[in-house]
């Protein structure tokens, strides 16, 4: 069976036929896609699946990874934070580190292709290799750039404005770039360990292994220990509900050990939890996909109380499991949740606490939210839609001034 | 005239219409700004905001397939205008131009009666987007009504949306392609029944089932 056929049970034969049609029109196109990491993180997770699926459709997609030292990734981490709107110092030295690493990579990478598809700020400088008339360049931004720090965006825009097109995940991230800006939301893979169906005994086994009793309804947030995910706010909201409801809170995250900021946030989380036996703080390795899947499936309510989000795919993951979700109305989250129809959008700790209580006490309403959410994800946030949008983007690069394009 | 219909009873070649979304970096905080942009944005922007709901929220029927109504009602909380925008009968319009003029007229009339404008909260502005529509030939071909019903059961939503919405409004063919083809077969009653459907009030799957039901009913009448 082909990889693509595995999706038929979720999206139907018609959708797969459309993908094959588009693939037929792009047969033999050479695409090189570059990001900053081969494992870990949402981009690598998606590329791991998109590359073989593209091959199956006849598109010759090659995946390469930019290399850099600690100093480079410290700079790009600050760039990332500053683009999200967090105040950072960005010095002449930082710029020099970025440029040097870009130059080193340019000397080592083969960017000869019909389409050069670059993800996020780290490899954005590779556009220096752009030669007149050869290959179309696309910059794919996975970050919330709705209110970036001006000097950092200005530096990056010097590169981004040289691409043929940019791709953003949500409408409010749009920039004044004078080149086409395409909106493509990311996606989840329904066949991956993180999202596939699990049996009750598989779910039980994970809860047992993680020592979380299933004696009370469980409220869960799966997120890095990062201030922008507001884990301390989650505990405060949980406490408001806990006054009236028997329930447990699971905060499951990872990546704290090698991230100084993460360790600090984790410390604050433990402090806020204050040894409460109903609050479970889990540090999971990046490979804990089945565990995350089971935690989401075993929960009554899922939270994503973010203060900022690139997109917030954990929301789609939870909705795909037909769970009621309470999420911050930021970044790409409102694209995934329509308030009181396919989930709950909140702006405050108090609002989040209120809705935790409501959903725990009205499980039938929560079930309807979850079911609507799952259908919304099926149509808009599965990998097949993502792949279709990328194929359309590749075709669009050959017709950038047209708005009705006949493909024959 | 659709290209597949330049000869009566020619086979029906199903096309697929697939849309890519562009961002425009245009945003509106209140009704005056919404109106200002509506006057000047390309037709592909109007098409996006009145049609993407149909494919992206197809399970939501009978939610109005119109972003303007949604924003005015849920963000600006101007319920009366929201309701008027939601009730715009899209099937009545044969061109995007006419649809745009009507949207503008409805908002202008409402604004004439009001001095105070409500402002969208931070982060809830209206962001204008644009459709790039791709028309792709599929491998599905029908030579008679039986094959036609079989094909409609199998085609993707992109095909349904192309033949019902894009062909009629974006390519200004005046009516949906299915009715036109049925008429070319001499099936006038069936053509009329399909043309009578208001496709904006169905989910894509509901629309597919309704077309198949009408065609199969006709086949039974014919004894095939």
Image (tube, rainbow, N blue to C red):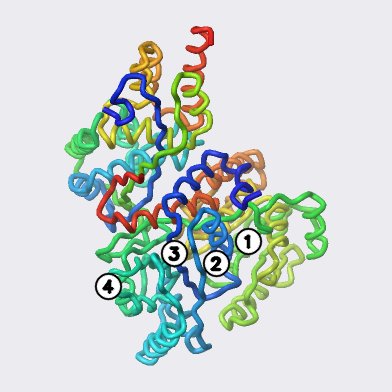
At horizontal 74% and vertical 67% (from top left) the residue drawn is A276
Q: CA distance from mark 3 to mark 2?
A: 38 Å
- Front-lying residue, A379 or A60: A60
Say whether disc 3 or disc 1 marks the residue closer to the N-terminus: 3
On the picture, is A3 further left or further right than B21?
right
Quarter containing the C terminus of chain A = top left
Secondary structure state at the residue bearing disc 1: strand
Tell me whether circle 2 and circle 4 mark residues in contact (CB < 8 Å): no
Between disc 1 and disc 4, the foreground one is 4
Between disc 2 and disc 4, the foreground one is 4
Q: CA distance from mark 3 to mark 4?
A: 17 Å
Say whether disc 2 or disc 4 marks the residue closer to the N-terminus: 4
Between disc 3 and disc 2, the foreground one is 3
- Front-lying residue, A320 or A148: A320
Q: Can you identify the residue that label 4 sits on?
A: A132
Q: Is residue A47 visible?
A: yes
* Marks 3 and 2 belong to one chain: yes
Indicate which disc residue A221 carries. Answer: 1
Indicate which disc residue A229 carries. Answer: 2
Q: CA distance from mark 1 to mark 4?
A: 48 Å
Tell me whether circle 1 and circle 2 mark residues in contact (CB < 8 Å): yes
Say whether disc 3 or disc 4 marks the residue closer to the N-terminus: 3
Residue A363: percent from left, percent from top? 66, 42
Chain assignment, label 3:
A
* Residue B205 vertical placement versus B55 (above, below): above
Q: Can you identify the residue that label 3 sits on?
A: A30
Q: Quadrant of residue B144?
A: top left
């Amino acid at each position: 069976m082909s990889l693509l056929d595995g999706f038929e049970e979720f999206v139907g034969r018609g959708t797969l036929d459309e993908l094959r049609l588009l693939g037929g029109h792009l047969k033999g196109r050479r695409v090189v896609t570059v990001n900053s990491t081969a494992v870990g993180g949402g981009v690598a997770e998606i590329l791991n699946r998109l590359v073989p699926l593209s091959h199956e459709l006849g598109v010759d997609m090659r995946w390469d990874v930019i290399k850099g030292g600690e100093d480079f990734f410290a700079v790009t981490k600050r760039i990332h934070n500053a683009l999200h709107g967090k105040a950072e110092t960005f010095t002449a030295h930082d710029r020099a580190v970025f440029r040097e690493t870009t130059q080193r990579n340019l000397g080592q990478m083969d960017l000869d292709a019909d389409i050069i598809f670059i993800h996020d700020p780290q490899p954005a400088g590779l556009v220096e290799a752009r030669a007149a008339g050869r290959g179309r360049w696309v910059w794919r931004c996975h970050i919330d750039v709705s209110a970036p720090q001006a000097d950092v965006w200005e530096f990056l825009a010097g590169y981004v404005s040289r691409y043929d097109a940019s791709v953003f995940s949500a409408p409010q991230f749009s920039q004044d770039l004078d080149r086409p800006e395409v909106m493509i939301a990311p996606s989840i893979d329904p066949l991956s360990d993180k999202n596939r169906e699990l049996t009750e005994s598989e779910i039980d086994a994970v809860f047992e292994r993680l020592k979380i009793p299933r004696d009370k309804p469980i409220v869960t947030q799966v997120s890095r220990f990062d201030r922008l995910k507001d884990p301390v706010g989650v505990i405060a909201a949980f406490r408001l509900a806990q006054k009236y409801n028997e329930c447990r809170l699971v905060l499951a995250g990872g990546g704290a050990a090698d991230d100084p900021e993460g360790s600090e946030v984790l410390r604050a989380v433990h402090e806020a939890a204050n040894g409460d036996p109903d609050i479970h703080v889990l540090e999971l390795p990046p490979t804990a996909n089945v565990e995350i899947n089971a935690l989401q499936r075993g929960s009554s309510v899922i939270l994503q109380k973010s203060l900022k989000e690139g997109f917030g795919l954990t929301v789609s993951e939870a909705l795909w499991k037909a769970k009621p979700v309470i999420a911050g109305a930021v970044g790409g989250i409102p694209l995934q949740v329509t308030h009181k129809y396919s989930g709950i959008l909140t702006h405050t700790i108090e609002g989040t606490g209120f809705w935790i209580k409501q959903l725990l006490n009205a499980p039938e309403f929560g079930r309807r939210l979850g079911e609507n959410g799952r259908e919304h994800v099926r149509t808009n946030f599965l990998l097949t839609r993502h792949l279709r949008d990328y194929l359309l983007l590749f075709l669009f690069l050959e017709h950038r001034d047209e708005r009705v394009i006949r493909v024959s | 005239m659709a290209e597949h219909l330049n000869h009566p009873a020619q086979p029906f070649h199903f096309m697929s219409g697939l849309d890519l979304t562009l961002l425009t970096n245009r945003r509106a905080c209140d009704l005056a700004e919404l109106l200002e942009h509506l006057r000047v944005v390309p037709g592909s922007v109007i098409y996006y905001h009145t049609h993407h709901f149909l494919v992206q929220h197809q399970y939501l029927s009978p939610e109005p397939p119109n972003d303007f109504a949604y924003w005015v009602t849920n963000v600006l909380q101007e319920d009366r205008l929201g309701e008027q925008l939601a009730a715009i009968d899209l099937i009545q319009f044969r061109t995007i131009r006419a649809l745009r003029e009507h949207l503008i007229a409805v908002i202008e009339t409402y604004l004439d009666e009001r001095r105070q404008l409500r402002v969208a909260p931070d982060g809830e502005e209206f962001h204008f987007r644009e459709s790039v529509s791709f028309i792709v030939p599929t491998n599905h071909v029908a030579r008679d009504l039986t094959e036609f019903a079989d094909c409609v059961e199998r085609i993707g939503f992109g095909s349904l949306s192309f033949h019902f919405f894009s062909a009629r409004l974006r390519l200004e063919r005046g009516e949906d392609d299915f009715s036109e083809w049925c008429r070319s077969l001499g099936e006038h009653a069936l053509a009329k029944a399909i043309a009578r459907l208001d496709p904006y009030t169905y989910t894509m799957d509901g629309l597919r089932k309704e077309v198949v039901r009408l065609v199969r009913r006709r086949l039974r009448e014919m004894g095939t």
